[in-house]
Amino acid sequence: MVIVVRMAIACAVVGLRSDVVKLVVQVKLLPTPEQASALEATLRACNRAATYASQVAFAQDLKDRNGLQKEVYADLKATFGLSAQPTVRVVKKVVDAYTTLKANLRAGNLGSPTSRRHRKAVSTPIVFRPEAAQPFDDRCLSWQHDARTISIWTVDGRMRGIRFACSPDQLKTLVAHRRGESDLVRRGGKWFLVATCDIPDPEKYEPVGWIGVDRGIVNLATTSDGTNHQGRRLGRYRRWQARKRAELQAKQTRSATRRLARRAQKERRHATHVNHEISKEIVSVAQRTGRGIAVEELGGIRERVRLRGDQRGTLSSWPFHQLGQHLAYKARRAGVPFLEVDAAYTSQRCPRCGHTERANRPTRDHFCCRRCGLAGPADVVAGVNVRDRARSAWVFVTMPVPLPA
């Protein structure tokens, strides 16, 4: 059997260097009413300017930063009241948005070229929401960590002494590792700053063994040690949310639409919290026992699997990808080796004799080898198979590359 292995480098944000882990730290701003009014006016002005720059970029096919900045720089300053550096940030924000759009089109994330969504994306300029996030660099924004305040540029002038709240760990990370831009975000009437932090990679140890993790829908994660993180509670919560969502959608009012958006955010936060708890526990066990973590490589599973209509919503809301990301970046921060291995037949293969057959798994929960009689929980057996494949794959990962003659 050919074992496909990939060193996972997923993290909390996109874009990793080989020697650092990029994480984001979100702090809550506590502005006075006057400060909040200035922040809101600034966010709206920047996004109006970004929409204007996007229209120019689309009309003149200017997708490079220097060309677009040369074309719109004077207009953005004169028309929208922006200073020099915020104008530069707005231009970069527009260019980055078109770069992301191009990548999504190339990856097929917006459907085929004949789909309505794809045609709309390529035929109209990008429009920025009035309260979309706005990046600020160190020329526009400064942090006073001891006083827990910030100073930020606004259209009403420099605003100083805006308080922020965060945990001691977040503050320590900000002081030691913050790099680059910070995004000003307004969400649910509250203000946040999202800062990027470059945390140096700890040195990975040589694992004495592996913890195989099988991800599923009924059981979100089951380890080769037999630890089972059930998803029934999350499933019940999501079904309850779906019923409430259907009731609100039937009303077809503006207030129902607003409540639907709030419910969607709440459900997403709940699933993220559950994934954080599960991944934190697994990484902690691996670090304490000196083992590595191995998971199945499940990329493209939604395209490969054919489901009944009543199953599609369940699979689409299955947060397995996020759980894998959390495991990867938490393992990397802790110096725990992390591997993704081939997922083929992990639930049908006997880890003792190697016999692979669909009949080995007569039900969803039970495994019984038709050849040697090994029996046990199906998800635990799958986790053991993942663990065994990681042992074999690690030999190839750590094998020295021969120098050319």
Image (spheres, helix red, strand yellow):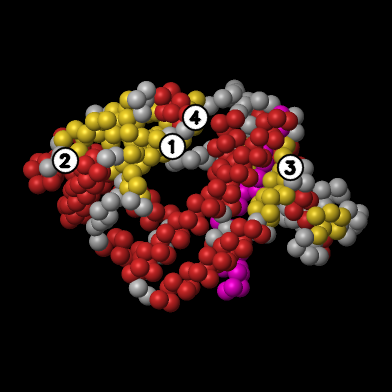
- Residue 163 lies in quadrant: top left
- Mark 4 is on which residue type? Asp
Q: Earlier in the sequence, mark 2 or mark 4?
A: 2
Circle 3 residue: 387
Check disc 2 and report the residue beneath it.
Answer: 155
- Give the SS element for disc 1: strand
Q: Are marks 2 and 4 in contact (CB under 8 Å)?
A: no
Q: Position of residue 130 (x, y in %)?
A: 25, 53
Check if mark 1's residue and mark 4's residue have beta carbons within 8 Å: no
| Residue type (three-letter) at the residue carrying disc 1 | Val
On the rendered structure, is 395 left or right of 161? right
Q: How many marks?
A: 4
Report the residue marked by disc 1. Answer: 24
Which segment is the magenta one?
290-312
Task: State how far apart marks 3 and 4 are (Cα).
Answer: 33 Å
Closer to the chain start, of discs 3 and 1, is: 1
Mark 3 or mark 4: whose residue is earlier in sequence: 4
Q: Is residue 369 left or right of residue 157?
A: right
- The image shows residue 37 at horizontal and vertical percentages of 22, 45
* Residue 258 appearing in the image: yes
Q: Which residue is mark 4?
A: 169
User: Which marked residue is nearer to the observer: mark 1 or mark 2?
Assistant: 2
Q: Are marks 1 and 2 in contact (CB under 8 Å)?
A: no
Q: Secondary structure at mark 2?
A: loop
Q: Position of residue 71 (x, y in %)?
A: 13, 44
Would you identify the image quadrant in which residue 249 lies? bottom left
Q: Quadrant of the C terminus?
A: top right
Looking at the image, which residue is at 44% across and 41% down?
Answer: 14
Disc 2 marks which amino acid?
Val
Instruction: Kindly give the residue lying farthest to the bottom in the view shown.
Output: 250
